[in-house]
Image (spheres, grey):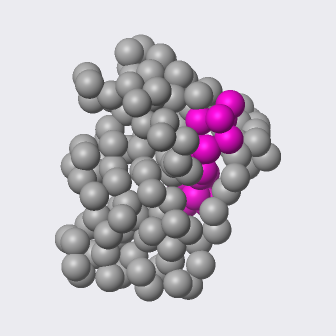
Amino acid sequence: MPATLVDTNILVYAYDRGEFIKQQQAIRVLEFLQASGAGRLSVQCLAEFFRVTTKGISPILPIQQAKEQTEALALSWQVLNVTPQIVLEATRGVRDHQFSYWDAQIWASARLNQIPLVLSEDFQDGANIEGVRFLNPFAPEFEIQKIIG
């Protein structure tokens, strides 16, 4: 199985009881990637996970639980740092591929760490940008077992 970078939305859906179908799929995907050892996270995703799950009047998680889950993810997954090179590559992604900056940083993290696959609902499903392939794990035809290879 190729190394696979997981975007923030997958992490968030795993805890979002308001999106039951996506929650179940996110949990299946995360469990599979963790068991296979192929899953990777970015420091960016950990920070975004904490922020998204604790914001608003009715947060997905209480702050303490979000802190604990962020710590658990940081300890149990391989986490990629955001480096100056990743920031510079992300700026190129904005310029050359018209990504938003934060999406470009996910792409740059995968590209510069030689991770060929990103799971996210924020990119065009099936797109391959300079060796980084994007798949939407919530697409009807997605099957985690099919990415083994």
Q: Which residues are magenta?
A: 33-54
Q: Is residue 127 left or right of residue 66?
A: left
Q: Is residue 39 left or right of residue 8?
A: right
- The foreground one among 2 and 46 is 2
Residue 91 position within the rendered picture, expressed as x and y whole percent measured from the top left? 35, 81
Outermost residue to the right: 75
- The foreground one among 132 and 70 is 132
Q: Is residue 9 shown in magenta?
A: no
Where 45 falls versus 139 (above or below)? below
Residue 145 position within the rendered picture, expressed as x and y whole percent measured from the top left? 46, 27
Q: Main secondary structure of the magenta part?
A: helix
Q: Is residue 71 left or right of residue 104?
A: right
> In the picture, residue 99 is in which quadrant?
bottom left
Q: Residue at x 61, y 44 (%)?
A: 38
Residue 24 position within the rendered picture, expressed as x and y whole percent measured from the top left? 47, 17
Q: Is residue 47 shown in magenta?
A: yes
Where 79 falls versus 39 (above or below)? below
Q: Residue at x 70, y 46 (%)?
A: 77
Q: Residue at x 52, y 84 (%)?
A: 85
- The foreground one among 61 and 14 is 14
Say if residue 120 shows up in the picture: yes
Q: How many marks?
A: 0
Where 49 falls versus 111 (above or below)? above
User: Which of the image's four quarters has the N terminus?
Assistant: top right
Say if residue 67 shows up in the picture: no
- The foreground one among 129 and 21 is 129
Q: Is residue 12 left or right of residue 21?
A: right
Residue 128 position within the rendered picture, expressed as x and y whole percent measured from the top left? 28, 58
Outermost residue to the front: 149
